[in-house]
């Protein structure tokens, strides 16, 4: 990984971290529910909620990257640097 990737930070990252930590706690509670023998319908409902939370965090991350990095990509293209464009292409695979 390049230094750029190690220090890459957006304003939305703290919000994404909070969302993922909530989802992490929720996922741990689902494991406990499974161990306690809770009904599958309840488990599926809770897993669906965690899945939606993680998907929303991913969507926020990607949209933020596009919003903030697209302008850098355009600037970089005029200077002949292709790394931001490659980053952009890579992240859009996860949409």
Image: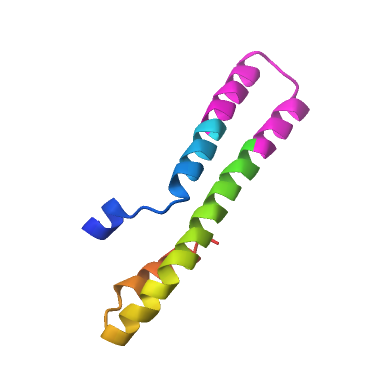
Q: Is residue 87 above or below residue 43?
A: below
Identify the image quadrant of the N terminus: bottom left
Residue 2 visible in the current orientation: no
Q: Position of residue 56 (x, y in %)?
A: 60, 49
Q: Position of residue 38 (x, y in %)?
A: 71, 18
Identify the image quadrant of the C terminus: bottom right
Res 33 quadrant in image: top right
Q: How many marks?
A: 0
Q: Is residue 80 above or below residue 67?
A: below
Give the residue drawn at x 57%, y 29%: 27
Q: Is residue 25 above or below residue 48?
A: above
- Of 25 and 37, nearer the camera is 25
Residue segment shown in magenta: 24-49
Res 83 quadrant in image: bottom left
Q: Is 43 contained in the magenta span?
A: yes
Q: Position of residue 52 (x, y in %)?
A: 64, 44
């Amino acid at each position: 990984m390049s230094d750029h990737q190690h220090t890459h930070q957006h304003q939305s990252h703290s919000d994404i971290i909070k969302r993922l930590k909530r989802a992490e706690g929720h996922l741990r509670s689902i494991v406990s529910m499974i161990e306690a023998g809770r009904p599958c319908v309840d488990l599926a409902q809770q897993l669906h909620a965690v899945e939606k939370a993680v998907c929303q965090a991913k969507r926020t991350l990607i949209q933020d990257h596009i919003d903030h990095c697209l302008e850098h990509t355009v600037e970089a293209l005029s200077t002949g640097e292709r790394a931001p464009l490659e980053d952009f292409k890579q992240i859009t695979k996860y949409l």
